[in-house]
Amino acid sequence: GPGGPRLVIGSLPAHLSPHMFGGFKCPVCSKFVPSDEMDLHLVMCLTKPRITYNEDVLSKDAGECAICLEELQQGDTIARLPCLCIYHKGCIDEWFEVNRSCPEHPSD
């Protein structure tokens, strides 16, 4: 409302100027990245090894997903990592946006 703090654009540091918030969607990790950081971000994204996984559908219940702690149930779409850990596909996709390694074997 009118009583709230007013942002005076002129007082913002240059790197926070409004046009920055457009940014670009990284084709590698799908994050929005400010336009002036895109080159650096792409280099990081393309050089950081990303674990690939095999997508699978569970034929039987398999305990709990270490990411969301919900059960892995028959019929769920799962991701099987090279270390043979399995997670819900949606969970590992979100995990990989932040991390590039197995939640349980971070050194791999």
Image (cartoon, helix red, strand yellow):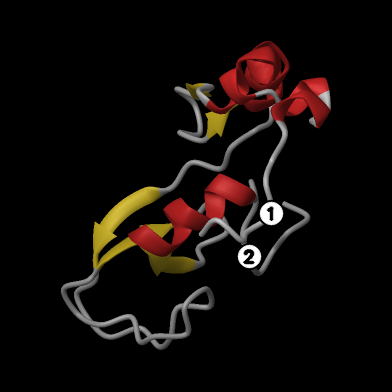
Q: Which mark is residue 107?
A: none
Q: Residue at x 63, y 18 (%)?
A: 42
Q: Which residue is mark 2?
A: 103
Q: Quadrant of residue 33?
A: top right
Please tell me whether mark 2 sits on a helix, a strand or a loop. Answer: loop
Figure disc tally? 2
Please tell me whether mark 1 sits on a helix, a strand or a loop. Answer: loop
Q: Are marks 2 and 1 in contact (CB under 8 Å)?
A: no
- Give x and y (percent) for residue 100: 64, 46
Q: Residue at x 16, y 73 (%)?
A: 75
- Give x and y (percent) for residue 1: 51, 59
Labels 2 and 1: the sequence-earlier one: 1
Q: Residues within 10 Å of mark 2 (few under 14, many from 20)?
A: some
Does 38 sit left or right of 29 as displayed?
right
Q: Residue furthest left?
A: 75
Q: Nearer the viewer, residue 1 or 51?
A: 1
- Give x and y (percent) for residue 38: 63, 16
Q: Residue at x 46, y 58 (%)?
A: 92
Q: Residue at x 80, y 20 (%)?
A: 14
The answer to whether residue 31 is above or below residue 43 is below
Q: Residues within 10 Å of mark 1 (few under 14, many from 20)?
A: few
Q: Nearer the viewer, residue 105 or 41?
A: 41
Which amino acid is tagged 2? Pro
Q: Nearer the viewer, residue 1 or 54?
A: 1
Q: Nearer the viewer, mark 2 or mark 1?
A: 1
Q: Which residue is mark 1?
A: 5
- Give x and y (percent) for residue 103: 63, 65
Does 69 sit left or right of 44 as displayed?
left
Q: CA distance from mark 2 to mark 1?
A: 41 Å
The answer to whether residue 47 is above or below residue 8 is above
Which amino acid is tagged 1? Pro
